[in-house]
Image: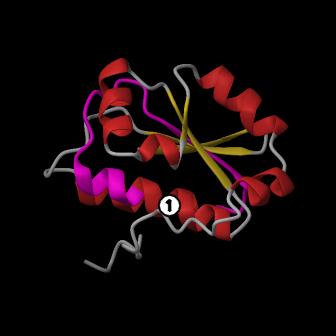
Amino acid sequence: MLIICEKNIAILCWSCNVTLHNMDDFRHALWKLMHRREQRLMLDLQGVMYMNSAAITWLMEACRQGVGHQRRIVAAGIQSSLEVILNLAGAGAAIQLFRYRSAAIDDLRSWSVREEWRAWDDGGQRFSRARLGSPQQS
């Protein structure tokens, strides 16, 4: 796990499948990303072929919380197998998926808070109410 800042975008680089064995590490990394000062956040999932349902729930909740704090989070480096899993779980409605990191950066650079609030006028009610709590909480 590595968080870098590129062009005022905080990027979490996660390169391994998210399974029962490392899902707490993923939750902790996602929590750290969400507590950055940048408004534009990216999850770079290059190399990830599988994500379990708990991780997908945390990802969707992070997006919901991000909107509440006038932030945008996108996912880049999405392989076709992960795209299928995320779309079947309904995460495609919560987070914009990009195959290439450069396209995600372009999208984030053009993003404005007003557009996001208009698009999410329903208050994100379609998301699970699970909390992304701090890493110490289980």
Q: Residues within 10 Å of mark 1 (few under 14, many from 20)?
A: many
Residue for point 25% across, 77% down: 138
Is the image coloured rainbow, by chain, by secondary structure, or in one colour?
Answer: secondary structure
Residue found 41% across the figure and 70% down from its top: 132
Q: Nearer the viewer, residue 101 or 2?
A: 101
Which residue occupies 25% across, 33% down?
50
Numbered-mark total: 1
Q: Quadrant of the rendered structure where residue 37 is?
A: bottom right
Q: Is residue 42 magenta?
A: yes
**In the rendered view, would you say 52 is above or below 109?**
below
Between residue 35 and residue 85, name the one nearer to us.
Answer: 85
25 up-or-down from 96: above or below? below
- Residue 76 visible in the displayed image: yes
Residue 46 placement (x, y as % from top left): 42, 25
Horizontally, residue 30 falls left or right of residue 65, namely: left
Tag 1: amino acid: Ala
Magenta segment: does it hold 132?
A: no
Please report the residue visible at 26 percent of the width from the left and 60 percent of the height from the top: 24
Quadrant of the image containing the N terminus: top left
- Residue farthest to the left, as pictured: 21
Q: Secondary structure at mark 1?
A: helix
Q: Residue 35: image x %, image y %?
A: 59, 66
Instruction: Read off the residue under disc 1.
Output: 62
Residue 35 seen in render: no
Q: Position of residue 124 (x, y in %)?
A: 57, 65
Percent coordinates x, y for residue 73 in the rendering: 61, 48
29 relative to 102 in the view: left or right: left
Q: Which residue is at the far bottom?
A: 137
Q: Which residues are magenta?
A: 35-58
